[in-house]
Image: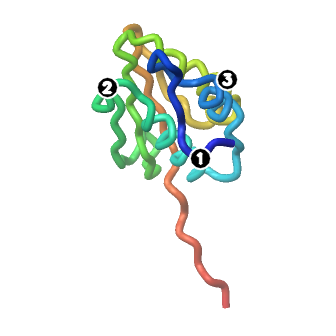
Amino acid sequence: MIDEPTLDADGYPSEETLEVIKNWKYNDDTKFVDLLEYVNKVWHWTDYMQMREIQNRLGIDVYEYTCVTGGWSGNEELISALEQNFMFWALCWRESHRGGRHVFEIKKASPTHDLP
């Protein structure tokens, strides 16, 4: 695994970066926050990827990520790599819209409590 995502000579996400995204391991929900922060480092037009903390329709505290590809094929490759990560897509995908807008929800980590 590479620590930082990389771009190829043409400014697109490198094959190594796409493979890291596809193979990002599921340990707990917070690891998917790390995944989207990783993706954000190579997202073209970074203001087209936004995160906010909200309560979802079920009243659960989540991080909501809205990612808009802007039609740029490099961003489309990143979304495709996320989609190929089965655990991420199954647990975090909320909706996609024509025009390249994708919304993901990641449940906020529950606070841990020490047991007596």
Residue 40 or 114: which is nearer the viewer?
40
> Between 28 and 43, which is closer to the camera in this rendering?
43
Mark number displayed over residue 45: 2
* Numbered circle sitting on residue 3: 1
Depth check: give the residue in front, 57 or 98: 98
Can you see residue 55? yes
- Please report contact status of discs 1 and 2: CB closer than 8 Å, yes or no: no
- Could you say which is closer to the camera, residue 23 or residue 83? 23
- Which quadrant holds residue 75? top left
What is the quadrant of the C terminus in the image? bottom right
Mark 3: amino acid: Gln
- Give how far apart the Cα atoms at labels 1 and 2 are: 21 Å
Mark 3 and mark 2: Cα distance apart in space: 23 Å
The disc labelled 2 sits on which kind of residue?
Trp
Q: Amino acid at mark 1?
A: Asp
Closer to the eye: label 3 or 2: 2
> Quick one: SS at disc 3?
helix
Residue 61: image location, x then y, percent: 44, 52
Point out the image quarter for the N terminus.
top right
Q: Residue at x 53, y 69 (%)?
A: 111
Residue at 46% across / 50% down in the picture? 60
Query: Under tag 2, what secondary structure?
Result: loop
Q: Earlier in the sequence, mark 1 or mark 3?
A: 1
Image spot of residue 7 (x, y percent):
50, 27
Is residue 64 left or right of 22 when viewed as pictured?
left
Residue located farthest toward the bottom when viewing the structure as drawn: 116
- Tell me, for residue 84, which label it has, or none: 3
